[in-house]
Amino acid sequence: MSIRRAPRGTTALDRLREHYTDAERVCRQCGYEDLDGQWSARTTGDRVLYRHICPSCGAIETRTLMLK
């Protein structure tokens, strides 16, 4: 049995950020579809904060992942 490993530099948190970038493109406030936008990620030590700012209306979407 072989173990499949992620490419170097790609973590589960990176993959989650990429998921948000790919799956959550439509702004909930104005309906703008941001095809080129990226979600940003930062950590505070006990949580990971993901954020996207709509280039059309400036609405901020956030997701928080609590680490235990």
Image (cartoon, rainbow, N blue to C red):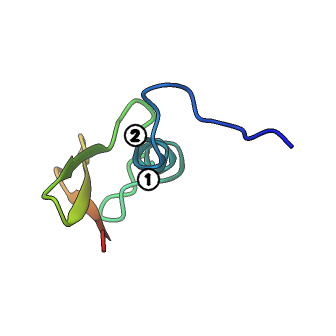
The residue beneath circle 2 is: 34
Which of marks 1 and 2 precedes in the sequence?
A: 1
Classify 10 Å Cα crowding around label 1: few (below 14), some (14-19), many (20 and above).
Answer: few
Q: Which one is in front, 2 or 38?
A: 2
Mark 1, secondary structure of its residue: loop
Which residue is pictured at 86% across the width and 43% down the height?
A: 1
Q: Position of residue 9 (x, y in %)?
A: 42, 28
Instruction: Say whether marks 2 and 1 touch (CB < 8 Å).
Output: yes
Residue depicted at x 45% and y 41%: 11
Q: Looking at the picture, which amino acid does disc 2 mark?
A: Asp
- Is 35 displayed left or right of 51 in the figure? right
Q: Secondary structure at mark 2?
A: loop
Quadrant containing the C terminus is bottom left
> Looking at numbered disc 1 in the image, what kind of residue is underneath it?
Val
Where residue 50 sits: x, y (%)?
28, 54
In this rendering, the answer to whether 9 lies above or below 30 is: above
For the residues marked 2 and 1, what is the alpha-carbon distance in whole angstroms?
6 Å
From this viewpoint, which residue is outermost toward the left? Answer: 44
Res 44 → quadrant = bottom left
- Residue at the location (40% across, 40% down)? 34
Left or right of 28? Residue 45 is left
Q: Residue furthest right?
A: 1
